[in-house]
Amino acid sequence: MRKLLNVCEAYAVSHGLRYNVKKSEYMVFKAGAKSCPRATTFTLNNSPLNRVSQFKYLGHWVTEDLRDNVDIERERRALSTRCNMVARRFSRCSRQVKITIFKAYCQSFYTGNLWVNYTQRVYSALRVQYNNGFRMLMGLPRFCSASGMFSDMHTDGFHAIIRKRVASLLKRLRGSTNSILNVMADRWDSPLLGRWIRLHAKA
């Protein structure tokens, strides 16, 4: 790590650049139960770097234990905000308009196709939020059947959306001309493939 930082420093100096140390952070991924001691410090331009346990990259939360709980919770909060906004602003619209708006605003599940390591509690909370948001928008009873209401409204349920997202990602990986991505897509022990299998058959 220190050797890599030295290379970065030399590159910056040779090109007349300067790193903003205050905005530079580093994270060490855990290997099972093992992790790098907190006493270990790294410097950039003779200034110590701040070690973090999680950071946000392109809107996706990455954590040192490589679990997706934080990112799923981020999506749940964002979904709650969008559902409340849609329910307030479009409460007087027709049923078809409401369904169209709901599909546009509440079915994105950004980076949902990358979730492979999470707790059932966090995952279920997102599913419940999605179901309740649809009930609230359509004015349905709180305890009505989720599968029944989505079937009646010809709208994808939570699990259907996740399956489509994962299938789309696998299709793009397998159709890519990048050799590294092709290796990832063809591995039977790939977390993405394991996730796809679990979506269709519970162990």
Image: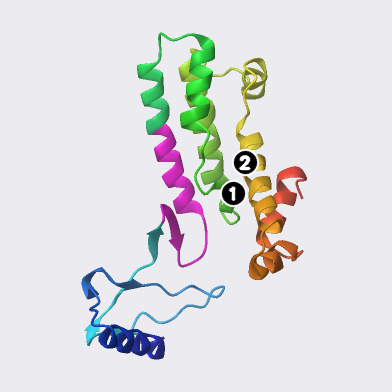
Rendered residue at 57%/73% (across/down): 32
| Residue 40 pos. (x, y %) | 35, 85
Q: Circle 1 — which element?
A: helix
| Residue 59 pos. (x, y %) | 41, 52
Tell me the amino acid under the disc marked 2: Ile
Left or right of 86 in this view: 113? right
| Residue 98 pos. (x, y %) | 49, 17
Q: Pointer 1: residues within 10 angstroms few (<14), some, or many (20+)?
A: many
Mark pair 2, 1: CA separation: 7 Å
| Residue 105 pos. (x, y %) | 46, 30
- Mark 1 sits on what residue? 113
Q: Is residue 163 above or below residue 186?
A: above
Rendered residue at 46%/67% (across/down): 64
Does residue 140 appear in this view? Answer: no
* Cβ atoms at labels 2 and 1 below 8 Å apart: yes
Does residue 92 appear in this view? Answer: yes
- Mark 2 sits on what residue? 162
Q: Is residue 73 above or below residue 37?
A: above
Q: Quadrant of residue 46?
A: bottom left
Left or right of 153 in this view: 46? left
Q: Magenta span covers which residues?
A: 58-80
On-image quarter of the N terminus: bottom left
Rendered residue at 32%/71% (across/down): 25
Number of labels in the image equals 2
